[in-house]
Amino acid sequence: MNTLNLKKRILLADDDEMILESFQSILKAAGNEVTTAEDGKEALTLALDSKASGNKFHLLVTDLQMPNMTGLELIDELKKAEIHMPILVVSGYFPSWVRLELIKRGCLNYIEKPVMFDELVDRIAMIS
């Protein structure tokens, strides 16, 4: 496992509580500050608050299929709000049309679930 001290402020959005807890734990162990959101709507609120406070997130890690606001809708809303940060999509749902939609939105970083923790930490380390 890549255990570099990344010190990134990460916003993590997923509606699966077990995934949120496990990803948060492994990302914190890798030296990151992690804030969790249970859906896209909560993630958007947190991103807007962080922008307003000047303490912006360095990275969004999001699922695609969430209640209240999907990952694609979240990406669109962040763009409308002019909140710019790298995005890593981690989802079990990746039909070809979804990959095309992510590329159109400028999101080239995605991992299909189930994901190995080493792969998640290494991928995040490569994203600037």
Image (cartoon, grey):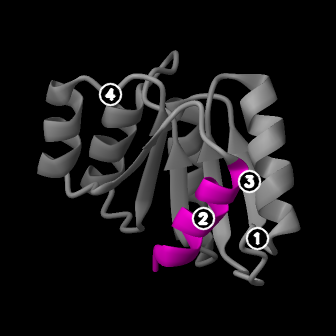
Q: Could you tell me how far apart the alpha carbons at marks 2 and 4 are, in whole angstroms? A: 29 Å
- Give the number of the disc on residue 50: 2
Q: Position of residue 5 (x, y in %)?
A: 77, 84
Of labels 3 and 4, the one closer to you: 4
Residue 94: numbered disc? 4
Q: Inspect the image, locate mark 4, and give the three-letter code of the amino acid beneath it.
A: Phe
Position of the N terminus, as image quadrant, is bottom right
Query: Which is nearer the eye, 62 or 112?
Result: 112
The one nearer the camera, 44 or 99, is 99
Q: Earlier in the sequence, mark 3 or mark 2?
A: 3
The tag on residue 32 is: 1
Residue 111 place in picture, x, y as percent: 45, 44
Residue 82 located left or right of residue 117: left
Amino acid type assigned to the residue bearing label 3 in the image? Thr
Amino acid bearing label 2: Ser
Q: Dot 2 lies on which element?
A: helix
Closer to the eye: label 2 or 4: 4
Residue position marked by numbered label 3 in the rendering: 35
Disc on res. 43:
none
Looking at the image, is mark 2 or mark 4 earlier in the sequence?
Answer: 2
Q: Which residues are magenta?
A: 117-128
